Amino acid sequence: MRLHRLELTGFGPFREKQSVDFEAFEHDGIFLIAGRTGAGKSSILDGVCFALYGSVPRYETGDKRLRSDHCEPEDPTEVRLEFTVGDRRWRVTRAPEYQRPARRGGGLTTEPTRAELEELVDGVWIGRAAKPRDVGLFLDDVLGLNAQQFQQVILLAQNRFSRFLLASGTERQSLLRALFGTRRYEEYARELGERSKAAQHELDALGERARTLLDQAARLIVAHELVPADEIDGTTEHDLAARRAAVDLGESRAAYRLDTLTRERVDADDARTAAEAAHGERVALAKAQAELGRARERLAALEAAGPQIADDRRRLDRGRSAEVLRAPLETARRADRTAAATAELAASADAVWARAVSGTDDADTDDLPAVVERLTGELAVWTAALAQEAALADGEAQMMAAAADAARLEADIVALDAQRAQVPAELERLDAELEAEREAASRRDPARVRHDEISARLTAAVEAEGLADAQREAELLHRDAAAAAAAAAAKVAALLQLRLDGYAGELASTLVDGEPCAVCGATAHPCPATAADEPVTDEILATAEARRDAASRHERAASDEAKSARERHAAAAARSGGESAGLLREQLAAAAADLAAAERAVERRDALAARRTGLAALDLEAETSRAALAEQLTGARTRIAALQERVTAAREAVEAARGEHASVADRVAHATSIRDAGRAAVVARTDAQRAATLATQARADADDRIAASVFADAADVTAALIAPGEMEALTERISAHDAQLAAARARMLELELELAGAPAEPIDTEQSQNALAAADAARTAALRAESDARTLVAGLRDLAMHIDQAYAGVAARAADAAAIARLADTVAGRAPNTMKMDLETFVLAAELEEIVTAANLRLSDMSSGRYRLQHTDARAARGAASGLGLEVMDAFTGQSRPAQSLSGGETFLASLALALGLAEVVTARAGGVRLDTLFVDEGFGSLDEETLDLAMRTLDELRQGGRTVGVISHVAAMKEQVPAQLAVEATPAGPSIIRQDSGVRV
């Protein structure tokens, strides 16, 4: 990460815009930020930290103190920083919350927190995020460090400079994890743990399945009495061979039982077949005897019905002869009825004709067809005039409607002109109201941004209040778990000591005066150890170690939970901006009121704009409508003139056609009735003559046919006729009787031949039926027993196969599960891992060793060879992270000691060397965070002149590789040694300014 340019406006001690060009120091590699105490040197680092993280290392209350006290109410406050991460250049701009004059109404209003992130792409700044929350989330991914880590390795502030040196293993692990990206090793350990649990669960499931199958087989064997229950119950659950042998014994006995039952079922099948055959023979004889009796009765009944069938046959013959004459008789009768009917119709038609022509010239006319022809011609002429008469009324109605339409159109045009005259004034009024509402509506977006930000901060504040209790509870649990773990560890140590003492007692019991000791070879034993009263066994020691490990795991879990609770609470407090929920609720209510007012203004503005647009559209539509109405009025007047001309011509034609009648329609109706009456009379007379001729011919034909038949007259023929349905029934009855009589005689003869030699008395089938039922029941029972035995054998064989497969799977899986468990425990830092160091810590310990090596190259020079940092992987107390410890080796004493024992100046040198070593190792890692810019804030004043020269020489070496180091100090000697400088000066008026290099203000 490399910084390029910083701009501070209204920030800290700076009122006017101040700029720092870090690129100007790239050639020198090291520059000094100098100035009097309180001038604002550290505020430059505050600006860098605030731009990147929205907070500063010196203030715990967030951005409340960031706005310059020298600012006037209308002055802005803003920080802008340009930097590069990898090969991407970014620019972040932030502004804290502060009070400014309200734009309307006087007084002050709150300017909300603001943030914007941009990226330089092809020479153009492209926006990537525009809200504080979004900018923070985006920068988390870009930077790869949180604010605390940034302040430990890049921005070494006054109160955080030595934190990495003096940090606990857990804090150091968190920083190193972020710098080197080793969280994946933690994921490896978690994944191995999950695989170990899954393998053990699978192994347990396989064993449980095998035991379940054995239990199921045992229950099945006992239930079917294959093996006595006392023999099964005598095998223990762990005696797998005996239980498996019992299954084999039950299976063999079940197979023997199946063979026996199969033979019994075959015998039952044979017995049932024999009984069924005997019963079938007796049933057949009994059935033949019963059928012979029924055949004799049927034949007697058919012979008794013979006389009646003979009468039916004679009646059927006469009916068939009469049926031949049915049609001529019916034709003659219909012809007589038709002749009478047509004669009556002719008389009626003549009467109608006489009434129609009464009093006219045609009353005495005999040539009726000629009159009809003349009337038809006249009707053709009058019908044409009838159409004009009907159209006359319609034309007059159309002419009146057209006149009404013209009057309506004239009235509509007058009303539309009156309405349009009011539109200009209404548009002018709407424009005035719209202009007033637009200004109020323009405040909606800023109001919504402020409301959303305060709402998010309020949510975080409420969450922080809730998390505070959880944090206290988690810390209390961690305290109790740590005490329990310490007690368990002490118990193990005491037991080990007792056991060692017991070993000495056991050895002493074997000593004999004058004989050499097996350990030291001495023949004199002046003070042998005494044997312990209660020796410490392996079981006692293993139990204590298990309790200690359980307590340690519980303590680690409680520690992780406490750490997580603190982090959640800190994160929520940071998101809330450090303000209380009550104050944020008040701010939210005010912001909601402002937003609601702006929303109402937007609604009124939109409504007025829509109303104005609609009114203008209506005026344009009205103009179009008036032109259309004028065009319609012209068309209506033209149509009225055309209709008037057509009505006049039709009226003249109708007057000529109606004659003496009231209307043409009346004249046409009168003439039509006369013509129709004449036509009907002509047709009726013709039909009557034709019908009389046909009736005479039909009667003559019928008389000739009767004379040639066996019947005397028409009445005799009618009496012999039979209805069609009845004739068909007679035919069927006679045919059926003949067929049934022949069949009955044939069947009776067949049955008598079949029963020849059989006893005459009826056959009894009850005894054979009972024998068959008994044989069938025996066969069914044998089949059921055989099926049950076969199912039992198959079930036992299947269970035996699955039992063998299950135990084979247990044996195969046990070795894999044990290997996975050992690997998971080793990677997670559990036994057999004697160092109790997990995989991620192991990797980070290797990185820390390189950091210490790099740091010692400088610390040895700066301390004149006295001090050297030393990595230690000793196990930390109370379950803390082990393997990441740091000690200081003092060459004067030859002893290592904790870093906390160093003096202020020594701590500064060690911290500086460690920070520089950390920067070099991180930069050397491919894919890690490259630290191209470092800041050191004070601490040089605690060094003597010689040590200061060594420290400055070390910093000067950092220019190799293109790194830039900024040092903040008021030590005069440093001003002489560092030519590239930023001078922070307080002006007489109060605000500070920044001068770069030669004093030219940037």
Image: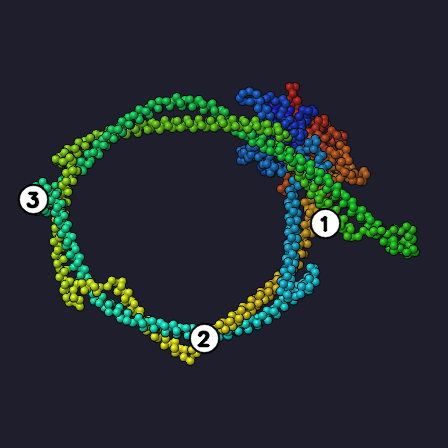
* Label disc, if present, on residue 74 of the rendered structure: none
Is residue 863 visible in the rendered structure shown here?
A: no
Q: Residue at x 80, y 40 (%)?
A: 895
Q: Residue 456, image x and y in percent?
A: 58, 33
Q: Nearer the viewer, residue 8 or 347?
A: 347
Q: Nearer the viewer, residue 539 or 762?
A: 762
Q: Give the amino acid type for the residue marked by disc 3 in the picture.
A: Asp
Q: Secondary structure at mark 1?
A: loop
93 lies left or right of 407: right
754 lies left or right of 815: left
Q: Earlier in the sequence, mark 1 or mark 3?
A: 3
Q: CA distance from mark 1 to mark 2?
A: 96 Å
Q: Residue at x 65, y 47 (%)?
A: 190
Q: Give the amino acid type for the residue marked by disc 2 in the picture.
A: Ile
Circle 3 residue:
364
Q: CA distance from mark 2 to mark 3?
A: 106 Å
Say whether marks 1 and 2 touch (CB < 8 Å): no
Q: Looking at the figure, which quarter contains the N terminus?
A: top right
Circle 1 residue:
831
Q: Is residue 744 above or below residue 205?
A: below
Q: Residue at x 62, y 35 (%)?
A: 463
Q: Residue 188, image x and y in percent?
A: 65, 47
Circle 2 residue:
763
Residue 488 lies in quadrant: top right
